Image (spheres, coloured by chain):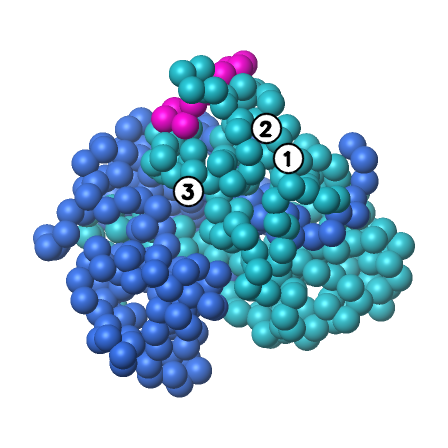
Chain colours: A cyan, B blue
Amino acid sequence: MTSKYERANASDGQSRIPDIVIGRLPIYLRSLKILLSQGQTVTNSQELGDRLGISSAQIRKDLSHFGEFGKQGTGYDVAYLCKQLEKILQVDCIWPVVLVGAGNLGHALASYAGFENRGFRIVGVFDNQPDKIGTHVGSLQVEPLTQLPAHVARHHCRIAILAVPTKAAQNVANLLVEIGIKSILCYAPITLNLPEGIRVEYIDPVIHFQHMTYYLEKDCLKT
Amino acid sequence: MTSKYERANASDGQSRIPDIVIGRLPIYLRSLKILLSQGQTVTNSQELGDRLGISSAQIRKDLSHFGEFGKQGTGYDVAYLCKQLEKILQVDCIWPVVLVGAGNLGHALASYAGFENRGFRIVGVFDNQPDKIGTHVGSLQVEPLTQLPAHVARHHCRIAILAVPTKAAQNVANLLVEIGIKSILCYAPITLNLPEGIRVEYIDPVIHFQHMTYYLEKDCLKT
């Protein structure tokens, strides 16, 4: 896909649009889709900002990187802005995702209801524990890690979820990179060491907790 | 705890420091702790920014809300800045957390290694499924929801993790608010409707996926 704005990898330093801006677009999209599901057809940066705790000026500035989406005084057409954000984020399609790790977390993820209608489908679940291979996780059967390269090639997977124990995470991540995975969503509480050009995002509940405790009246235990 | 900066709830519109800035502090803290664990004693906004994909100017501006932490030319003392951020975020202590939902996700969370040394401890696991009550999740025994109010009161819990099925999430959240919970980390793919002053953060893997697909060469399935 070509686009009128620069879709360069942020890590190469050539990106015209700050990565921090890109990271907010999915949050806007999520909020807009909720409005849409509630039957709201028009919104504005003030309303969106109030819902998200982001200033309306920030939202207008973020969106202005990609074009003109609203009209002064009338705001944004919710359905149209959703479609445009889906196009920009390239989620106007279904991305095949492989899931590595068929433990409790893998099971929870395989039955997560929020993927399919937002651009993603888990197409394979992998583990190297003999007692897990062949069992079912959601509608998928757990396959051994040895099957992962062929599976990734066949489905053109570029995205993987890493839901393995911490001590296995780096090795599995290395394998994923070797076989062509470009983006990894990591649930283990570590920081992966991977080559340039590979994008890792972390699911880290503590980041959210620490954001919340800022606002709480202090009532916790001495360490 | 009183502090020299304004620690108002962002939702009341009186916060002096934008919530979006507060949300970045845990990310800085995470990165600094990694540096610390690697034995690095000094860093600067440029290095931190490169690691996080955030501009060094943004980092300096964010931190300047809270005081002077570095010296021109010498940068930040990593251990000192960690301690200060922990103080600001109020995680220089252990917050007791209740976990509701003892399914696959609850099990995964109860054995998550990343809580304790970052300010949090799960002190109770609750479910209303008779076959789950009494079973063990990590070192804790699953208790019925009826025990939740007494437990929250006894442990002075203000934070809860909601790891229940989507259809149960709103009702359980209502109960949590009734019994004094102020901050909820929600894993269900919905948006909760809760009173003013209650803070909810969502763990939403799709937000991360959609951030990653922006940078990928488009190679996905037509919807």
- The local secondary structure at tag 1 comes to helix
Q: In percent of the image, x 53 and y 15: which residue is there?
A: A41
Give x and y (percent) for residue B149: 31, 38
The quadrant of the rendering that contains the N terminus of chain A is top right
Residue with the mark numbered 1: A86
Residue with the mark numbered 3: B201
Is residue B56 within the magenta segment?
no
Q: Which residues are magenta?
A: A39-47
Q: In percent of the image, x 47 and y 68: which residue is there?
A: B51
Tell me if label 1 and label 2 are in contact, CB under 8 Å.
yes
Residue A86 lies in what quarter of the image?
top right
The amino acid type found where label 2 is placed reads Cys
Q: Is residue A93 left or right of residue A202?
A: right
What distance separates the C-alpha of mark 1 from that of mark 2?
6 Å
- Same-subunit check for callouts 2 and 3: no
The amino acid type found where label 3 is placed reads Glu
Which label lies toward us, 2 or 3? 2
The amino acid type found where label 1 is placed reads Glu
Mark 2 is surrounded, within 10 Å at the Cα level, by few (under 14), some (14 to 19) or many (20 or more) other residues, namely many
Label at residue A82: 2
Is B27 rendered above or below residue A56? Answer: below
The quadrant of the rendering that contains the C terminus of chain A is bottom left
Is A129 rendered above or below residue A116? Answer: below
Give x and y (percent) for residue A42: 49, 16
Q: Is residue B150 visible?
A: no
Label at residue B75: none
Dot 1: chain letter: A
Is residue A41 within the magenta segment?
yes
Q: In percent of the image, x 68 and y 69: which residue is there?
A: A173
- The local secondary structure at tag 2 comes to helix
- The local secondary structure at tag 3 comes to strand
